Amino acid sequence: MSSRRGLLIILSSPSGAGKSTLAKRLRAWDPTLSFSVSATTRKPRPGEEDGKDYHFTSEEAFKSAVTESEMLEHAFVFGNFYGSPKGPVKEAIDSGKDVLFDIDWQGAQQIRNSELGQHTLSIFLLPPSITELRRRLESRGQDDAETISRRMQKSWDEISHWGSYDHVLVNDDLDATEEQLKTIITATRLRRIQQPQLLDHVRALQSEFESLS
């Protein structure tokens, strides 16, 4: 086992709050950070690769994985199942690697309540204002007006769950928020529970102390 146990780092926010950009910056800062590749029952889209973009699976296999407690979290969204396989995540954190999750508040809650919940670090990103959130969505040029309207309606539901996260940051400046994220992650990596070697070290100190008595 690694000298440090990895973290399950959850980033959540309403669409347009900068989550994807900051996740990319964190991975550039620490290339050992990996994204949790979700499993899904939907069909692959053009250009998507199995195992890289998603683990594409049948509905029967997905439901079986849920029944066997092989999913850290799962949800039914727009007619398809999505979930985070537990095995790869557990293997990663046991080897000292952090895993990054881009999920909503419901998925975050499921992970916090899972057997790996004690190794979870959850961070919610707030926009500086609702007006700015809409401006960012419109400036991306990815969605039509109807889609943007739906995203805006959903944004308040996401924001209303801010109080269930370990840390909440107002992303009014990408560079400043990035530095805050780095500080939070660095500090959390030093939590006692993330350092399994400490118990052996303390025992060695005790043995040395007793031998000097």
Image: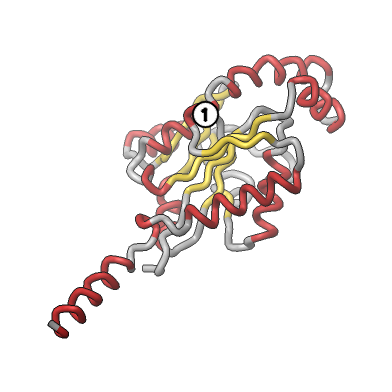
Residue at 40% x, 53% y is 90
Kind of residue at disc 1: Trp
Front-most of residues 38 and 180: 180
What residue is pinned by disc 1?
105
Image height of 189 relative to 41, above or below: below
**Residue 191 shows in this picture:** yes
**Dot 1: within a 10 Å radius of its alpha carbon, few (fewer than 14), some, or many (20 or more) residues?**
many
In the displayed structure image, the side of residue 211 where residue 147 appears, left or right: right
Image height of 86 relative to 198, above or below: above
Residue 15 location, x and y as percent? 70, 29
Q: Describe the element under mark 1 as helix, strand or loop.
A: helix
**Residue 56 shows in this picture:** no
In the displayed structure image, the side of residue 120 where residue 27 appears, left or right: right
Residue 207 image-quadrant placement: bottom left
Residue at 20% x, 74% y is 206
Residue at 87% x, 30% y is 139
Front-most of residues 84 and 6: 6
In the displayed structure image, the side of residue 193 where residue 97 appears, left or right: right
Residue 63 location, x and y as percent? 40, 32
